[in-house]
Image (tube, rainbow, N blue to C red):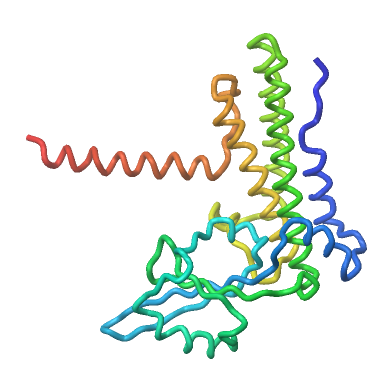
């Protein structure tokens, strides 16, 4: 069975990040416009009430195509909060006009406000556009790889062939992940998932690693019976296992302390 390399488009993106092609100011605009019919910034504002004194912190706005924005969930439109009277102060401090924005409270955290402001793709920095281009390209690539992999597995007629196929995929993922981590050179695993405000080369490598890790975890979850058990697992998988074990140990400790 001839082995078909899985990650050629990942390699292409990594090469573009490390050796940027000549990109003119509007080269990526049509690509990004196709990815979303809307273009807006999202400001995250977190309120704290300390001794009846209300304070807030506002994060730098993210474009709606940023991967972190996919996790945002709003309360139904028109939902009110006891913190509503503080919104005009926040808007004034952020130099935003009420008529130009839409405010929504977070569905999960009652003291978190999201402020949405329309923007043009052309107004984004070139670095931001390239970062979003990497995100959206790799997101689509993962969908293609998952679909192709499922079709390939379906057509294999023996456990040995499936194992060989999965082991090859694992090896490819590990090799590329290792080379990207080496390039990023993070101090700890958390730094792999933290982006700067500049959308620089390292940020683009980080988002590439994150999507590569998503693909790795998909292989882990879907084909656990065919995995190479000697293979390394993604950092985030290790973190999840550690968290699960820590929580279980707390329960065991509590049970032991309450026992005779």
Quarter placement of the C terminus: top left
**Residue at (39%, 83%) from the top-left corner?**
55
User: Based on the displayed image, in which of its 4 quarters is residue 255 positioned?
Assistant: top left
Q: Position of residue 69 (x, y in %)?
A: 59, 61
Tell how many labels: 0
**Residue closest to the far top:** 158
**Residue at (48%, 67%) from the top-left corner?**
77
Q: Position of residue 142 (x, y in %)?
A: 70, 41
User: Based on the displayed image, in which of its 4 quarters is residue 212 positioned?
Assistant: top right
**Residue closest to the far front:** 78
Q: Position of residue 181 (x, y in %)?
A: 67, 49
**Residue at (55%, 44%) from the top-left corner?**
235
Please indicate whether residue 211 sits to the left or right of residue 239 in the image.
right
Quarter placement of the N terminus: top right
Q: Is 108 in front, or is 219?
A: 108
The answer to whether 232 is drawn above or below residue 192 in the figure is above
Q: Position of residue 138 (x, y in %)?
A: 73, 47
Please indicate whether residue 149 sits to the left or right of residue 232 in the image.
right
**Residue at (80%, 70%) from the top-left corner?**
126
The answer to whether 43 is drawn above or below residue 207 in the figure is below
Q: Is 236 in front, or is 75?
A: 75
User: Based on the displayed image, in which of its 4 quarters is residue 70 positioned?
Assistant: bottom right
Q: Is 165 in front, or is 56?
A: 56
The answer to whether 144 is drawn above or below residue 105 in the figure is above
């Amino acid at each position: 069975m001839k082995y078909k390399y899985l990650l050629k488009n990942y390699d292409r993106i990594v090469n573009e990040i490390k050796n940027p092609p000549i990109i003119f100011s509007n080269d990526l605009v049509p690509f990004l416009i196709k990815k979303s019919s809307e273009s807006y910034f999202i400001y995250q504002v977190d309120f704290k009430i300390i001794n009846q004194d209300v304070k807030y912190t506002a994060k730098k706005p993210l474009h709606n195509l940023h991967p972190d924005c996919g996790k945002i969930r709003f309360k139904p439109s028109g939902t009110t909060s006891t913190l509503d009277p503080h919104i005009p102060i926040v808007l004034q401090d952020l130099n935003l006009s009420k008529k130009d924005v839409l405010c929504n409270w977070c569905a999960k955290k009652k003291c978190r406000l999201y402020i949405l402001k329309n923007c043009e793709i052309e107004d984004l920095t070139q670095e931001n556009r390239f970062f979003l281009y990497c995100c959206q390209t790799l997101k689509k690539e993962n969908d293609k790889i998952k679909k192709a992999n499922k079709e390939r597995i379906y057509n294999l007629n023996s456990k040995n062939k499936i194992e060989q196929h999965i082991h090859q995929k694992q090896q490819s993922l590990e090799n590329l992940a290792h080379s990207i981590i080496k390039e990023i050179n993070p101090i700890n695993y958390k730094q792999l998932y933290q982006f700067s405000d500049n959308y620089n080369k390292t940020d683009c490598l980080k988002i590439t690693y994150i999507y590569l890790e998503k693909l790795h975890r998909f292989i882990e979850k879907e084909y656990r019976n065919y995995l190479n058990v000697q293979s390394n697992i993604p950092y985030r998988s290790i973190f999840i296992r550690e968290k699960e074990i820590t929580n279980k140990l707390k329960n065991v400790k509590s049970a032991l302390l309450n026992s005779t």
